[in-house]
């Protein structure tokens, strides 16, 4: 492995750490800022790996999630982002594995329009799809982080029947 490849993996690891640490923030603005930093780093990580489908999905997800946060028009935003993803797939997809980030993002975006239980289920499926894509593009840091998040969400589904999460000693409800 050369130094450039290790540096690219380090960028991916940093992006993953910002994403994981965002889940421990109790303030929505801090969560959003951590997600933005993570998304920018992930864009560079996948772009430098030559995984352009994954890179551009992170740009689109950043815009989509920001609009979800700022408005209450979740279903409309999902439909518009779905159209943009289809447009992206026409220009970015070279083989069927390039569809994986688009498919994962559609699942993630769709689940965000429902209750938090569905968000958790959507996250499980979405992050497992990202793990497959990470294997394809040799994102070792992505395999570790996305796998960890997928397993964490599965754990929450299995052992937190009320679908709430403990953040800094406070129980947060997962209902809209």
Image: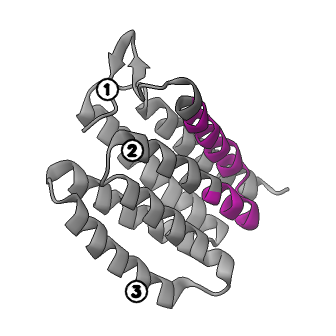
Secondary structure type for disc 2: helix
Q: What percent of the width, then of the height, locates residue 28? A: 25, 34
Image depth: mark 2 or mark 3 in front: 3
Q: Which residue occupies 35% across, 58% down?
A: 62
Return the residue at label 3. 87
**For marks 2 and 3 on the same chain, the one whose residue lies earlier in the sequence:** 2
Alpha-carbon span between mark 1 and mark 2: 20 Å
Could you tell me which quadrant the N terminus lies in? bottom right
- The mark closer to the camera, 1 or 3, is 1
Horizontal side, residue 91 vs residue 35: left or right: right
Q: Is residue 164 left or right of residue 159?
A: left
Q: Which residues are magenta?
A: 129-155
- Residue at left 61%, top 66%? 48
Reply above or below: 9 against 97: above
Quarter where residue 46 is shown: bottom right
148 versus 36 height, above or below: above
Measured in 3D between alpha carbons, the distance from the residue under mark 1 to the one under mark 3, in whole angstroms, is 36 Å
Instruction: Point out residue 164 in the picture as x, y percentages from the top left corner.
Output: 39, 25
Q: How many marks?
A: 3
Which residue does the image show at 41% across and 25% down from the upper left?
162
According to the picture, the residue beneath numbered tag 2 turns out to be: 35
Dot label at residue 173: 1
Residue 101 or 72: which is nearer the viewer? 72
C-alpha span from label 2 to label 3: 24 Å
Left or right: 49, with 113 as reference point: right
Nearer to me, 112 or 139 = 112
Q: Residue 4, located in which quarter of the rendered image? A: bottom right
Q: Position of residue 45 (x, y in %)?
A: 58, 58
Identified at 65% across, 50% down, the residue is 142
Q: Earlier in the sequence, mark 1 or mark 2?
A: 2
């Amino acid at each position: 492995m050369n130094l450039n490849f290790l540096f690219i993996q380090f960028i991916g690891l940093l992006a993953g750490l910002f994403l994981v640490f965002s889940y421990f923030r109790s303030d929505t603005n801090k969560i959003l800022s951590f997600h933005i930093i993570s998304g920018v780093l992930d864009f560079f990580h996948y772009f430098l790996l030559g995984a352009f489908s994954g890179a551009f999905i992170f740009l689109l997800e950043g815009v989509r999630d920001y609009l979800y946060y700022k408005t209450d028009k979740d279903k409309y935003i999902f439909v518009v982002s779905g159209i943009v993803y289809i447009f992206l797939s026409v220009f970015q997809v070279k083989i069927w594995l390039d569809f994986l980030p688009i498919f994962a993002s559609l699942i993630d975006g769709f689940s965000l329009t429902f209750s938090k239980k569905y968000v958790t289920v959507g996250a499980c499926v979405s992050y497992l799809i990202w793990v497959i894509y990470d294997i394809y593009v040799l994102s070792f840091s992505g395999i570790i982080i996305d796998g960890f998040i997928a397993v964490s969400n599965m754990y929450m589904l299995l052992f937190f029947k009320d679908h709430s999460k403990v953040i800094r000693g406070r129980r947060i409800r997962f209902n809209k």
